[in-house]
Amino acid sequence: MLILAIETSCDETAVALVENGTKIVSSVLSSSQDLHKKTGGVIPEQAAREQIKCMIPVLDEALKVAFSNRTLSETVSQIDALAVTYGPGLIGSLLIGIETAKTLSYLWQKPLIPVNHLIAHLYANWLENNKVNYIKPNTDVFPALCLVVSGGHTDLVLMKNHGQLSYLGGTRDDAAGEAFDKTARLLGLAGFMGGPAIAAAAEKYRQQSEKNLPKITLPRPMINSEDFDFSFSGLKTAVVNEVKKLQQTNDFNTQTINALSYEIQEAITDVFEKKIFKALNVFKPKAFLVAGGVSANLVLREKLKNVCAKTKVQFFVPPIRLCNDNAAYIGSYAFFNYHPAPLLKISANPTLEII
Ligand code: KG4
Ligand code: ZN
């Protein structure tokens, strides 16, 4: 089954063609990140205006990559269904994808599957990628412990099967990605995404760690709490205080910024390491799946891989290029959760939760 998937929940305009939920036939993405770098964050109105401009060219390109020399009617005859993200996300951005998908569904007379972006992130683990570490057809992964760590969400769920999720915990305030983004801004590392900037600065500190560099200690919020919830806003406050102290003594410089970055990354990833280790012991899943933008973090990947090895649970993490938002995993989700809905029943839900 070939599904054409559309994703426009934040700053990106993405279209992919995915076969049987596992094979990416084409995947095209345009992002307005460069515009948002100037403002240090996404301005919703600006993102949506860019998406209006990009939607048709991106769709056109994805179809061209998949069906190079075919006519439009030959192309359409190959597509079995459409899928689109309906939430969570920015309302103006979501609407562009949804209205495009509905129009194509009506014109081409193809079923349309509405997709929850958060659950869909996890399906990046079912996509074939360089033939390594993906969930091969017929691999038994259920029940699977699943962690979604993105810019706006941190959710831990138990997936008993496709479509059967129970909620175990999540962030009580800032998401992990938000913590990376906000602390990066406090350190003056802002660009658009804070995570990669913190990771790069932390790596510089690590490489020079034998040189007696400054050591800064930050809290690991809720690391020992009984539940499976998370909290990262206290970490941000601790960074504000450290920055103030360093500024007062004229010690806020590249070295201390790198030291703080290292400690921010350690603090966030230590919390996940400890809580996931506990969850693996409590729920005894067959597999552990992680996904979302923050799962691109190399230190986090390594720590989660190690706790899975210790507990002998299969570990799945998407290749880095599939961690951030794209339409390929939207198509995969739609195949494994094939529930087309009538067009009039599909509408944007900016505050949609994971379940
Ligand atoms: O899933 P995603 O692409 O978009 C949302 O749906 O939110 O996640 C974006 C988030 C941002 O907060 C970004 O800073 C974070 O993922 N991120 C990282 C890394 N790459 C992206 N965080 C830590 N380390 C990284 N290497
Ligand atoms: Zn996302």
Image: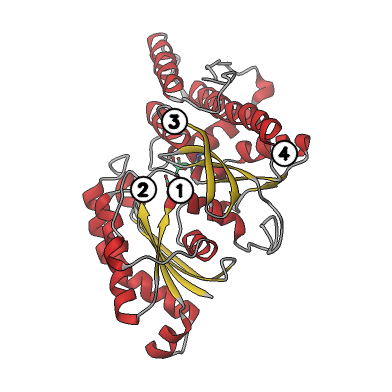
Q: Give, as a three-letter code, the residue at label 4.
A: Cys
**Mark 3 secondary-structure assignment:** helix
Q: Which mark is residue 51?
A: none
Q: Is residue 194 left or right of residue 263?
A: left
Looking at the picture, the colour scheme in use is: secondary structure
Crowd rating for badge 4 (residues with CA inside 10 Å; few <14, some 14–19, many 20+): some
Q: Earlier in the sequence, mark 1 or mark 3?
A: 1
Residue identified by numbered label 4: 308
Residue identified by numbered label 3: 179
Residue 221 image position (x, y, % from top left): 51, 20
Q: Give, as a three-letter code, the residue at label 2.
A: Pro
Q: Quadrant of the C terminus?
A: top left
Residue 335 image position (x, y, % from top left): 52, 66
Q: Earlier in the sequence, mark 2 or mark 3?
A: 2
Tag 1 near tag 2, CB within 8 Å:
yes
Residue identified by numbered label 1: 118
Please report the residue visible at 53 percent of the width from the left and 63 percent of the height from the top: 332
Count up the numbered dots. 4
Q: Is residue 321 visible?
A: no
Q: Earlier in the sequence, mark 1 or mark 2?
A: 2
Residue identified by numbered label 2: 88
